[in-house]
Image (cartoon, grey):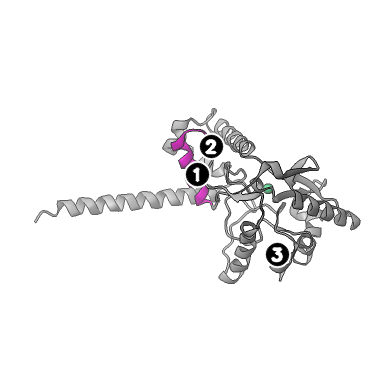
Amino acid sequence: MDDKEPLLLRFTVALVLMSVAVYAFWLYQADQTADDAGVNQQIVNSESSTKQEAIVAAFYEVDHASVAQTEEPPEITGDEEADERIREIAVQRGYRLQLQADEADLVEVDERRVLEEVRNSWEEMQKAALEDGVELILARGYVSIEEQRGDFLDALYERGVEQTGREYTTAQIQGGTADTAINATLRRHAIPGYSKHHSGLVVDIIDSSEDDFRGSAAYEWLRSDSFANAAEFGFIPSFPEDSPQQGMNPRAEEFVWVGADRAEELRQ
Ligand SMILES: [Zn+2]
């Protein structure tokens, strides 16, 4: 009996498994050595993660006539193979295809665009905060696919220049040379089609202080008593504490609109 073949097969399987393990470990390492200090993925117990998962899921359960789930991933670089590689890394980080607003239904507020109900809630919330002496500034609302593509590619371009003195080529992206840079870029920049801001239901809030948002009066006002003030106007945190990884590093300033009833339910 010729046992060469099974041996060769076993060797190949072992080699493939080892490569996968090394790649996974390398991606993990790349993330761990991230320069964003202070953001640590926390191990959560199942009880709290169920609650956090419900908060994250609530965004996708909003029933709004102007919002639909994106089915086809939009192009990124324009090269199919390179785009596929970037998407794989993004999905591994927890990114998903997002909800897309019908642009015709967006309305303007504070030089940003959001859906009408979101604008109304935002204006009421801003007024209520001001009555308590707290300033809320709308830093970001709707972002189009094109804007997000530009945002991601600009950031990847800068990283390429920083790391190698020039932009990553399509071949480098295809071949995996740019994987670390792509992964690092994805900590702050979503790929087009994968940003919650496409929904018109999401706002980034700041105040005019120089403070880190978590230490700001605005955040304190929104957050106190389990986000009572935010919930009263239909907003919930986009990255509840200890929630599962959603792609980009958690951002305290991002809130999603789910309507006051649902937001109040989630506080219970
Ligand atoms: Zn945001």
SS type, badge 1: helix
Res 76 label: 2
Would you identify the image quadrant in which residue 261 lies?
Answer: bottom right
> Quick one: which residue is furthest to the left in this view?
1
Give the residues in magenta.
Answer: 75-93
Q: Nearer the viewer, residue 197 or 47?
A: 197
Query: How many badges with numbers are in the image?
Result: 3
Is 208 situated above or below 239?
A: above
Nearer-N-terminus badge (3/2):
2
Residue 24 % position (x, y): 44, 51
Mark closest to the chain's N terminus, 2 or 1: 2
Q: Quadrant of the C terminus?
A: bottom right
Residue most extreme to the top: 166
* Mark nearer the N terminus (3 vs 1): 1
Tell whether label 1 touches label 3 (CB within 8 Å): no
Q: Position of residue 114 (x, y in %)?
A: 73, 46
Residue 177 in sight: no
